[in-house]
Image (cartoon, rainbow, N blue to C red):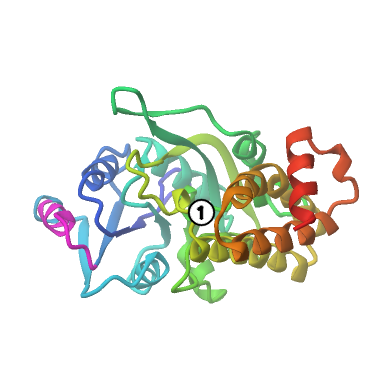
Amino acid sequence: MTLSEPAAVTIIVPAFNVEEYVADALRSLQVQTIATWSAILIDDGSDDATADILDRFAAGDSRFRIVRHDARHGLGTARNTGLDLVDTPLLGFLDADDILRPAALERMTTTLTETGSDFVAGAYVRLRANAEGRYEPGAMQPWVLAATDPARRAVTLRDHPAASGNVVAWSKISRTDFWRKNGLRFPEGTAYEDQVVAQMMYTRARAFDVISDVVVEWRERADGSSITQHKAELPVLLDYLEALRAGLAVLDAAGAQSAAAARVPLILMLDLPPLIQIASEHPVAKYRQEVGAFAREIRRRTDAPSTLPEPAARALALAAAW
């Protein structure tokens, strides 16, 4: 293999009841500008037409391999099932309701081949339904921009602490041996399982790359069935808060103070205000208590809450009193 040739990469695609979206995800793999990929499709106990769609794609394209779970085990378990089967130098993830941009794999695998870094992280945008019900990509969010632009090669968190804001699994391509040498696995039986893994990746990498190219369009389902749209449910809230805490704990344990400091304003401005709004009207007292306790933890991490934008500062003050 020459330096200009991208290495082979396996994409792990967990799928549960995504009959409306999974064909788009798999087609986005088939139109990649490189052909040196394979995909492990994990049917996590679907009871709709998802399994039939996976079968159809696998029958027509030998690069797709299907693994079936007899019952639903969750996203973390499904991803771990795929990790155990990877036999290529590089690996990545794609959620079955999202879409890869056509040049995503070529751009990321070529970068890794050139730099020798442990992983590369790209940018992403949200895919939302318009008034006619068609999904359209939006603008890049500020925290994604801060994490990925400008492009950087062979850096660490010390060089680029804002990278820690990119916490999703599906915007990255990694060296398979990096995962195995570091024993990286997804937490099972919980939501938001990629946040702690992302911080482990940043803190354990010898070096990583970031690119400003948008590599994934992240779908926010119009029917409200995405896990990120269920934060008003107490069990989902508890998983969400635990993921935020665990990610910060990884940064703290690694001595990555600048990265932890970069995460706190994002949590204050992006994560807490919607939770506080939900909590202020929530009928379950424990919901409000959990949000208040977390708000106090985060407030202790900032030296200057008064410098926050006014809505975030007001919301934080309210929640800290609960």
- Vertical placement of residue 88 versus 275, above or below: below
Closer-to-camera residue (183/227): 227
107 lies above or below 139: below
User: How many numbered discs?
Assistant: 1
Question: Is residue 132 placed above or below 182 in the rendered structure?
Answer: above
Q: According to the image, label 1 marks what residue?
A: 231
Q: Is residue 267 left or right of residue 111?
A: right
Q: Residue at x 36, y 42 (%)?
A: 221
Viewer-proximal residue among 175 and 218 = 218
Q: Which residues are drawn in magenta?
A: 45-56
Location of the C terminus (image quadrant): bottom right
Q: Residue at x 37, y 41 (%)?
A: 100
Q: Is residue 160 visible?
A: no
As drawn, is 8 to the left or to the right of 312? left
Dot 1: what SS?
Answer: loop
**Residue 79 is drawn in which quadrant?**
bottom left
Judge from the rendering whether residue 132 lies leftward or rightward of residue 6; answer left or right: left
> Which class describes the residues within 10 Å of circle 1: few (<14), some (14-19), or many (20+)?
some
Q: Position of residue 133 (x, y in %)?
A: 29, 28
Residue 258 coordinates in the image, percent (x, y): 81, 53
Residue farthest top in this picture: 132
Residue at 20 percent across and 49 percent down: it is: 19
Residue 226 pos. (x, y %): 39, 50
